[in-house]
Image (spheres, rainbow, N blue to C red):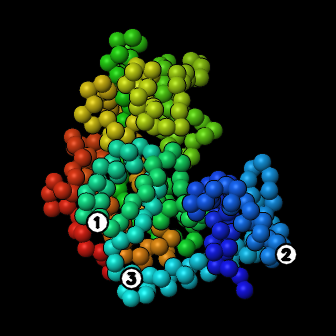
Amino acid sequence: MLDWQDIQIFLEVARHTRLIDAARRLGLDHSTLSRRTRRFEQTLNTQLFERGPQGYRLTQAGAQLKAHAEEMARHAVEASESLADKNLQIDGQIRLGVTEGFGTWVIAPLLADFCQRHPGVTLDLLALPRVVNLSRHEADLAITVERPRSPGVVTSKLCDYRLRLYASQRYRVRHGIPTQLAELSRHRLVGYVDDLIFSDQLNYLDPLLSGDDPNHGSPHFALRSTSVSTQLSAAQSGAGLAVLPCFMTANNPQLEPILASEVEVVRQFWITARREQRQLARVRLLWDFLREALEANRDFLMGTGDSLTLPSDGAGPSSVAST
């Protein structure tokens, strides 16, 4: 008979590849997790992982066991949530993955009110310059810049947001500003690192530069970063011109939009969850809260409102879980 704790340990290692990540999730130290994993393989008399510099990779036998373990874990969650109407209780942990800029400048302030209303819920906010992987159980909910197409997930459009091209007063004094889009590549730019960009939806500058003068040469990126917050800081300091979300530049006296009639980028955020997680009352509650809070901030996200409206400032999203 297999030990359920051994199955849970195996599953975390299989999901995360790096032993240190799985150990952190399980609350175990690295060496203990390594010993438990080897002992489990010995119990089964089967090698489950190939160990190498890139981490733990599943063998064919390990992949077969993972499919069964995922099914066992799903049934365990469903059983625990159904006992004594536990699925109606608003407590427990929620892990929300979101892009770094949106998570820092919009989602975190909104969630302060959610936390105040629901003290029994613990929120883990993963504000990262990448997409969290729901299939590897990195999060319960994710907010993404591309619509997920993975099977087994529930997805809904969350909101639109607008980006514009910005220059600081310091940059304007030192270098001037372009008067038309065709002059853009003659200026110093701030943007993403091309080979590390995690979504084509973040590739704002290439389309703007495509109609430029081919005789002028390649555009000059003074600074590139995987972090949009770093790009904002660099643009404020005068490093170059940057395409930034309006929600990050509202009421920022150091940055002004330029070429407003020619540069107007509109993108979307999507909210998604694995189907079984979407059924949990606390996850449904946060899902509905975010949709209502962001609907109330439509003008702010599109750059026509000056400040973020917090739910506590007005009627705000309902605190009742949807059915």
Q: Secondary structure at mark 1?
A: loop
Image position, residue 54 (x, y; %): 75, 50
Q: CA distance from mark 2 to mark 3?
A: 38 Å
Crowd band around label 2 with a 10 angstrom C-alpha radius: few (<14), some (14–19), many (20+): few
Task: Give the spatial CA distance, label 1 vs label 3.
Answer: 16 Å
Examine the image and state in which quarter residue 138 appears: bottom right
**Mark 2 or 3, which is nearer the eye?**
2
Disc number placed over residue 76 in the picture, else none: none
Residue 214 located left or right of residue 68: left
Residue pushed farthest bottom? 84
Residue carrying label 2: 45
**Rendered location of residue 237, percent (x, y):** 39, 21
Amino acid under disc 3:
Lys
Circle number at residue 118: 1
| SS label for mark 3 | helix
Mark with earlier residue (1, 3)? 3
Graded by Cα atoms within 10 Å as few (under 14), some (14 to 19) or many (20 or more), the crowding at tag 1 reads: some
First of labels 1, 2 by sequence position: 2
Which residue is rendered at x = 73% and y = 66% of the image?
Answer: 37
Looking at the rendering, in which quadrant would you find the N terminus?
bottom right
Q: Which residue is mark 3?
A: 86
Q: Is residue 235 above or below residue 273?
A: above
In this view, the residue farthest toward the left is 314
Residue type for callout 2: Asn
Comparing 180 with 195, the one in front is: 195
The Cα–Cα distance between marks 1 and 2, rounded to whole angstroms, is 47 Å
Residue 178 rendering spot, x and y as whole percentages? 40, 20
**Foreground residue among 266 and 222:** 222
Q: Earlier in the sequence, mark 2 or mark 3?
A: 2
